[in-house]
Image: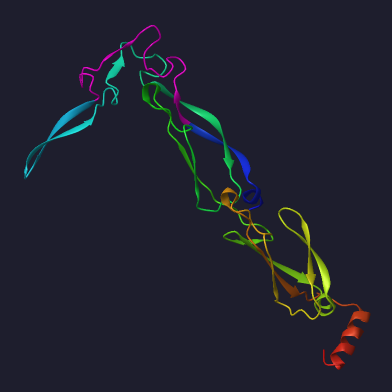
Amino acid sequence: MREAHKGVSKTIKLNKDESCNHCSGSGAEPSYGMKICSTCDGSGAISQQIRTMLGTFAQKQTCPTCNGSGKIPEKKCSKCNGLGITKNKVDVDISIPAGIQSGQTLEIPEKGNAGSYGGRSGSIYISVRVLEDKYFRRNGDDLYLTKEIPFTSLVFGDKINIETFDSEIILTVPKFTKSGEVFKLRSKGMNKLYNRGIGDLYITVKSVIPNSLNSKQKQLLQELKKEGL
């Protein structure tokens, strides 16, 4: 979540189709050219007759021999067998923008599988899942935090240090604040996607109950109890 707030660069590993280095993606062995595909006569498509109850229809399909290019190698590349592409393991650097939320998808143009015979590469689509933070809960662009403070801080008031994703801020707790009270701090939440502002931070203060007491603390609390507190 902290990375999602500020934006981050990541490197992902992919096993994807890349343009063949030996033939530069043409599919033809170097020093050999391309020729007209005999299956489609260079049109890149073939017609198929389909018979139905209503009659016979002609349907065009991409030529399976040339994959729609209309041309085939005079001699197939010895490295890629005429496909123009090879499988390679590659590292792809991606930039995740600040404010990204779980379930959103990033598109990285021209970093996907290479096109046949030197064609344009496709895109990579990345679905993002933002991990939960140890302290903050996120709802949209707003952050929520529960802060436990001593009972005396609620009664007498106090200044509490709160560490956000960007900096350390001071929350002023007024006198006689009730446990469970919520304070709203504007523009202290998550960065919004595409620099559209910053969400808010909601802090719930709760009285902390100690696990043990020393003799002096017990005595003071007993006196408070006698006073009806």
Q: Left of 126 or right of it: where is 141? A: right
- Residue 188 image-quadrant placement: bottom right
Q: Is residue 100 left or right of residue 215?
A: left
Residue span colored magenta: 16-44
Place of residue 19 in the rendered image (x, y in percent of width and height, measured from the top left): 44, 22
- Counting from the top left corner in percent of width and height, residue 159 is at 83, 68
**Residue 208 image point, x, y percent:** 77, 74
Q: Position of residue 222 (x, y in %)?
A: 88, 88
Q: Residue at x 41, y 27 (%)?
A: 120
Identify the residue at image location x=66%, y=51%.
Answer: 2
Counting the numbered discs, the total is 0
Does the segment drawn in magenta span residue 66? no
Q: Residue furthest top?
A: 31
> Looking at the picture, does residue 15 appear above or below residue 155?
above
Q: Residue at x 19, y 32 (%)?
A: 60
The quadrant where residue 56 appears: top left
Here the colouring is: rainbow
Question: Residue 16 versus residue 108: which sits nearer the camera?
Answer: 108
Q: Horizontal placement of 184 versus 12: left or right? A: right
- Residue 27, quarter of the rendered image: top left
In the displayed structure, 108 sits above or below 135; it is above
Task: Tell me which residue sits at (71%, 54%) in the image.
Answer: 165
- 17 in the magenta segment: yes
Q: Who is closer to the viewer here, 227 or 184?
A: 184
Quarter of the image for the C terminus: give it: bottom right
Horizontal side of residue 36 vs 79, given as left or right: left
SS assignment for the magenta stretch, majority:
loop
Q: Is residue 24 above or below residue 209?
A: above
